[in-house]
Amino acid sequence: MSVADFRRFVACVLIWGTTWLAITFQLGSVAPEASVAWRFALAALISAGICRWQGLGLRFPAAVHGHLLGFGVSMFGVGYLFVYYAERHVASGLVAVGYSVLPLTNMIGTRLAFGLPLNRRAGVGGLIGLFGVACVFWPELASIDASRDVVLGIALTAGGVAASSVGNVFSARLAMDGVQVWQKMAWGMGYGALCCLVAMVLGGRAPGFEWTAGYVLSWLYLAVFGSVFAFFFYLKLLDSIGGGRAGYVGVMTPVLALLLSSLFERFAWSPLSLLGLAAAMAGNFFILRPARAARSA
């Protein structure tokens, strides 16, 4: 890995590892639906500007817009709403660890959607990762006082993971349609923001905004860095070192998120949570590590 690639890798881990904590600054008087909408509306505008700068068109046939709508609603609408809801009930680092099973659910999603095989390595690694996630959540779940919140937080996290996996299936379909990543981001984030606004209206919530330093700075950080810059660095990594090695960003991100939760939130480490974090990382390493080429006889 070159120095430039290493810097991009570190940037992705630092940004995405801190966005989970930054979301907690959005959880106040403003409805989560509004916070997610404002975040992705700004990110969509920036992504659209990048498309224009790179000479990428933003007009697509109705059929492609159907895929873009599915991508945006699942990935940036429902998926992130569940994250914001989940962080009302459990520490942000726990939600990040829950998302460490995403490589497995993505493979299951592509298997169901496109008939791609699910290899044994992915299955074993996924089971190890699930065991790790269960270990991390168990000390919180075993607490009688907090058990109801934790159960709800786990359910919401699982819903967010499922929605993100559906979004990844739509993303793969859009790649088949010839839609570039920045085009997907511009329309997908726009549709995600619209989805959240619709949910806000249907829920009878006011489209509020909090003009405090914590809310405004976290909004800008999540939109500009967490939703645009990090994707830019990650896409550069994909082009340079490939999806397998770039996928290790998702292995390291929960580690940083959980460390920040222990410093700024109520999360307390235990031997079981340490074992769980190690198992979750090992499961992802097992899934992402390429199989050795077979030796010739």
Image: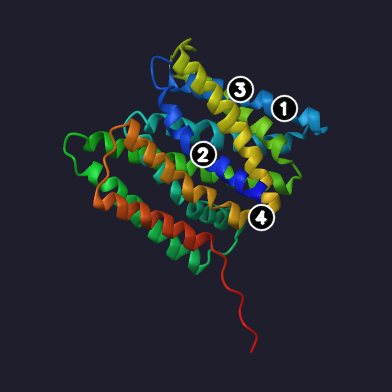
Nearest the viewer among 64 and 280 is 280
Which disc number belongs to residue 241? 4
Secondary structure found at label 2: helix
Nearest the viewer among 44 and 225 is 225
Considering only vertical position in the picture, is 253 above or below 53?
Answer: below
Type of amino acid at the residue the image marks with label 3: Ala
Q: Which residue is mark 3?
A: 41
Query: Which colour scheme appears in the figure?
Result: rainbow
Nearest the viewer among 82 and 240 is 240
Asked whether the viewer can see residue 149, the reply is yes
Q: CA distance from mark 1 to mark 2?
A: 25 Å
Q: CA distance from mark 1 to mark 4?
A: 26 Å
Secondary structure found at label 3: helix
Give the image quarter of residue 245.
bottom right
> How dense is the environment of label 1, judged by Cα within 10 Å: few (below 14), some, or many (20 and up)?
many
Type of amino acid at the residue the image marks with label 4: Ile
Type of amino acid at the residue the image marks with label 1: Ala
Give the image quarter of residue 57.
top right
Q: CA distance from mark 2 to mark 4?
A: 19 Å
> How dense is the environment of label 3, judged by Cα within 10 Å: few (below 14), some, or many (20 and up)?
many
Of mark 4 and mark 3, the one earlier in the sequence is 3
- Image point (51%, 56%), residue name: 108
Q: Which residue is mark 1?
A: 48
Q: Quadrant of the C terminus?
A: bottom right
Q: Position of residue 21 (x, y in %)?
A: 42, 31
Q: Which residue is mark 2?
A: 14
